[in-house]
Image: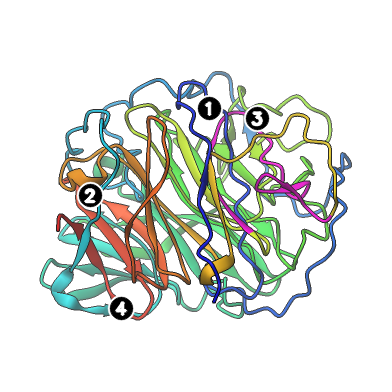
Amino acid sequence: MRLRPTVRATAVSLATALALALLACGDGDAKDGSGSGATDGTGSGGATSTAATGGATAAPKTEGSVTTPTGTGTAPAGTTPGATSTATGTPAPLATPRANPPRTVTTVNAFGGRNFDRPTELGEYPGGYFVAEQVGTILRVTSGGATDTILDIRDRVSTDGNEEGLLSVALDPAFDSNRSVWVYYAARSPRRTVLSRFTAGANGVIDKASALVVLEQPQPFPNHKGGAIRFGPDGLLYLGLGDGGSGGDPQGNGQNLGTLLGKIIRIDVRNTSAGEPYRVPQDNPFVNRQGAKGEVWAFGLRNPWRMAFDRATGTLWVADVGQGEVEEISTVRRGDNMGWRIMEGDRCYGASTCNRTGLVLPVTQYTHTGGRCSVTGGPAYRGVAVPEVASTYLYADYCSGELWSLPLDGGEPVIVARGLNNMTSMATDSAGRIYILRQGRPIATLASP
């Protein structure tokens, strides 16, 4: 009988934590799944400094001044960075810092118990909610479960690899006025991932012909696409990209600042046009470094599967899927090196020793024993609708179905629910409800027991 692994947490306050995620998703794991059959490399852990292929095809300009989030500011009016997908509606009240550990919660089926195949994203939307399906569709869903398709780009989306498909959707912070919907998906011939902007009509149907391709990233392998689109408190777009796939980061992308693979990027899309798809903020950390991509905000990630801003502090929380042993939860700040492939979690990867200088360790991590395999990140929850997990960061394991709640103001994670296998994503809405997205099952909300 295998022993249940302990969940390791660094009990530090967020005011002093500079922790970052190296969470690893084992190749061949189930999440949106790798299924690629790639063989893991040994990984020397050495960083590269030469420019690599695989850069974005767009040719952005560098802009003058953009405010850098410090982790201490509040979001400007009109944005909802605390939600997994930017949504319309009034943000829920902020919970006060918690004095007691998180407590057990239960789940209740939402949307009339309607099943979804491979849901990847959910958010509030005119007429109800939107639900993105990995195959390449976005559905509008009412509270009773009635659906209509508001975007179908299956002809553009590749699902050749188990981790490919339509991976993220976010409404623009100014959606009420500009009707912009941001979409990130995998495409083929050549294999690449695409960030596009679409425009929704007055009836909520998204005009397929309105697509403006903002960024295309060549992808060498079918796994590790990352893909969460999140708008920060500064109004800028953050996108997490995986290391390009296979196993063990064979191209060394995580530590190579000359590629966007294995990075969180930060771009300004507030005046997107065909002539200028985006601008690179002048205060991005590597704008003036020779051979580095100016879009890079943080690096050294393997496969960031979901990230979320804490709307009270501006802190960016990232769940990074591990290689074969360790899943990580981190907070990511400007210029941080999350360590992959030098390290997996707090362990040297493929070596008995490694140079840890300048690397940021996870806030918490867990191992793959006990049937665990791949982390799914959730929200930094500041709502009051589920007080048992107020002021905590939520994350789950795809295989074991365990849901953890980690206090945002420091402390140990607590398992608050079990049996939530095949979880692909989480979301919140303006009423403070927390949604659980699982493959082949109804979407559920967390509830007090």
Q: Residue furthest left?
A: 144
For the residues marked 4 and 2, what is the alpha-carbon distance in whole angstroms?
20 Å
Q: For the residue marked with disc 3, what is the amino acid?
A: Gly
Please give the name of the residue rendered at 16% of the width and 70% of the height, measured from the top-left corner.
111
Measured from the top left, where is residue 203 in percent x and y? 19, 61
Looking at the rendered image, the disc whose residue lies closer to the viewer, 3 or 4, is 4
Looking at the rendered image, the disc whose residue lies closer to the viewer, 4 or 2, is 4
Quarter of the figure with the N terminus: bottom right
Q: Say what secondary structure mark 1 lies in.
A: loop
Q: Earlier in the sequence, mark 4 or mark 2?
A: 2
**Callout 4–callout 2 Cβ contact below 8 Å:** no
Looking at the rendered image, the disc whose residue lies closer to the viewer, 1 or 3, is 1
Q: How many marks?
A: 4
Region rendered in magenta: 326-350
Residue of label 4: 441
Instruction: Identify which residue, 345 or 182, lies in the foreground.
Output: 345
Measured from the top left, where is residue 119 in percent x and y? 37, 70
Q: For the residue marked with disc 2, what is the amino acid?
A: Asp
Q: For the residue marked with disc 4, what is the amino acid?
A: Arg
Q: Earlier in the sequence, mark 3 or mark 4?
A: 3
Residue of label 2: 429
Q: For the residue marked with disc 1, what is the amino acid?
A: Ala
